[in-house]
Amino acid sequence: MRTPREPERPETPARHLTRLERSIDRAAHRLLAGKPRSGPRAAVIEVCVFLLKQAWACIFGALLLAAIVAARLWYPDDAPLARNDALTIAAILIQLGMLAFRLESGRELWVIVLFHVTGTAMELFKTDVGSWAYETEGVLRIGAVPLFSGFMYAAVGSYMVRVYRLHELRFDRYPPVWATTLVAAAIYVNFFTHHFFFDLRWVLLAAVGALWFRTVMHFRVWRRTLRAPLLLVFAGVALFIWLAENIGTWAGAWLYPHQADGWELVSPQKLIAWFLLMIISVVMVTWVYPPQRPVLAISGLPGAGKPRNR
C-alpha cells in the first residue's frame, strides 16, 4: 500500500514576493521540477536553496560591505570626494536600487528607516563617549558620525524582514509582543545608560532567555520545513554580524580604541552586544510581520492549512 505523499507546495507564497522574486521563484520551480524528494541529492538541493535564500536576504548588507572593502583597497587617498562621503553615496544608491527593483515592500521600508534612525542616534552617542570612532573627513555626516553608518543598521533590518518572508517563518510558543517590546526598549536604553549607571546587560540577557527559551522557529527551505530553537538562531545571526564587523573595522570604516595602533580582532564580548541588538531588530520586524504559528502541512487532515493551537 502506497503512503500518500505530501503535496507539492510553492517555495514561498507568491503574495509575499516582489516582482523580481516571483520571476526567480518560477525559474527555480522549473529547474527543480522532478528532482528527487529524498536521499543525498535532495539534501544537497535543500542546502543550496537555504544558502541562496540567505544570500538573497543579505543582499543589502553584502553590497554595502563590498563597498566598504573596495573603498579600503582601491579608493585613492587624494580623491576630491572624501572616502566617507563616497560610501554614503554608495549606500544611498544601494537603497534606491532596492526600491527600484522592488526588493523591499513599502511596509518593510518604514521599519528599515526606523532601524536607520535608531542606529544613527546610538552612533552619535557612542562616538561622543569614545566607544568607537570614524574618520572625521567628509561633509555628509552628523557631528563625528558619517551618514553611511545608519545604513549599516538598515542592512540588518533589511536582512531581518527579507528572511522572514523568504523562509515563511513560523513560531511555536512565541512570547507576547508587548513583553518583547518592553525588553527591547530596556535593551536600547541600557546601551546609553550603562555609561553612567549600572550595566544591566546580564539582567537583560536573563530576561531574553526567560521570554524566548521555549520558542521554536519553523523555517521553510525548499520541500522541507525545519525547526530550530529561536535563541540559537539569535546567537547564530549575532555571530555572523560580528564577523562582518571584523571585516568592516579591518577596512577602516570605524575603529575601536584598541585598534587605534593597528587592526586587531574585535573583542568576542561584542557578541553579547550584537545578541542584544538582535532582540531589538527582531521586535521591530514583529511590528511589520506579527509572529504566526505553524500550519498543518499534511493534506486531508481536519484543520490543514490553519494555524495550529499553542
Image (cartoon, rainbow, N blue to C red):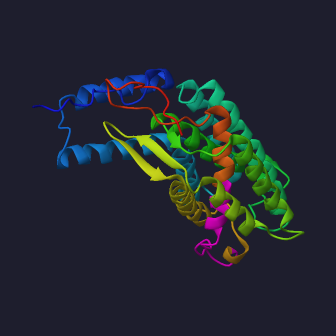
Comparing 255 with 233, the one in front is: 233
Residue 268 relative to residue 222: left or right: right
* Residue farthest front in this picture: 302
Query: How far across and down, in percent of the image, does residue 79 sit?
Result: 66, 52
- Looking at the picture, tell me which residue is in the foreground, 189 or 250: 189
**In the image, is residue 261 part of the stretch drawn in magenta?**
yes
Looking at the image, residue 168 sits to the left or right of residue 268; the answer is left
- The residue sitting at 17% across, 47% down in the picture is 39
Percent across and percent down for residue 117 are 77, 43
Answer left or right for 105 relative to 49. Answer: right
Residue 296 visible to an observer of this rendering: yes
- Determine the residue positioned at 74% across, 42% down: 178
As drawn, which residue projects farthest toward the right? 196
Indicate the quadrant where residue 106 lies: top right
Q: Position of residue 299 (x, y in %)?
A: 32, 25
Q: Quadrant of the N terminus?
A: top left
> In the image, is residue 165 part of the stretch drawn in magenta?
no
Closer to the camera, 304 or 253? 304
Residue 87 appears in view: no
Q: Quadrant of the C terminus?
A: top right
Q: Would you say 131 lies left or right of 305 here? A: right
Q: Nearer the viewer, residue 131 or 272?
A: 272
Please tell me which residue is depicted at 73% across the width and 47% down the height of the picture.
179
> Which contiguous range is marked in magenta?
260-277
Classify residue 123 by image quadrant: bottom right
Residue at position x 70%, y 52% in the image:
84
Q: Is residue 254 above or below residue 153?
A: below
- In the rendered image, the residue lying farthest to the left is 1
Give the percent coordinates (x, y) of residue 144: 82, 57
